[in-house]
Image (cartoon, rainbow, N blue to C red):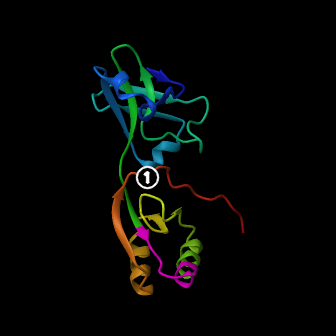
Amino acid sequence: MIIDSVIGNVHAVPAAELDGLHLEKVLLSGAELSKRIQRVRTDHGNELGLHLRARAGSAGDLCDGDILFRDAAGLIVVSVLPTDVLIIAPQSIRQMGIVAHQLGNRHLQAQFFGAQSEYGAEVMVVPYDHTVLQLLHQLEIPFSRQERVMSAPFRHAEHTH
């Protein structure tokens, strides 16, 4: 089966509407969320071809819960796998500047969250990398390592020197 568009998101569908429907999941890593063309397999072994005409979601990526297929019997949805990340919580603007400069020089992908986010603090989240771990220890910047389902995939910022 070839899927060319996202129908909606299961998180926006009332629970009563989902009662009795068979649910299959396509497990995708963060990196796979931005691929418009790919072959995937559901958790029930069904193979799908994704050939999305337009990018899904507000940032153009697939999202957790996106509905790829739906009929009277069930639906197939995207389920995002957790990503190994470092959650960096600088204690001062100086620490933030130092770590942002160091990680920026490495062209490391990062996401930023405010105090009102699920993290409960202003943090910088980056994919796990052992050299970043060493740097954070060396600079004595508070951090934690966690497996998180990220709301958006990490993206490279295009630039030239």
Q: Position of residue 23 (x, y in %)?
A: 31, 27
Residue at figure coordinates x 45%, y 86% from the top left: 139
- Check disc 1 and give the amino acid type: Met
Quadrant that contains the N terminus: top left
Secondary structure beneath dot 1 equals loop
| Magenta-span inclusion, residue 100 | no
In which image quadrant can residue 148 be found?
A: bottom left
Q: Position of residue 105 (x, y in %)?
A: 59, 74
Circle 1 Cα neighbour tier, 10 Å, few/some/many (<14 / 14–19 / ≥20): some
In which image quadrant can residue 52 be found?
A: top right
Q: Position of residue 41 (x, y in %)?
A: 35, 31
Residue at figure coordinates x 48%, y 43% from the top left: 33
Quadrant that contains the C terminus: bottom right
Residue at figure coordinates x 54%, y 42% from the top left: 61
Q: Position of residue 160 (x, y in %)?
A: 71, 64
Q: Which residues are magenta?
A: 87-97
In which image quadrant can residue 53 be found?
A: top right
Q: Is 94 positioned to the left or the right of 86 in the image?
A: right
Residue carrying label 1: 150
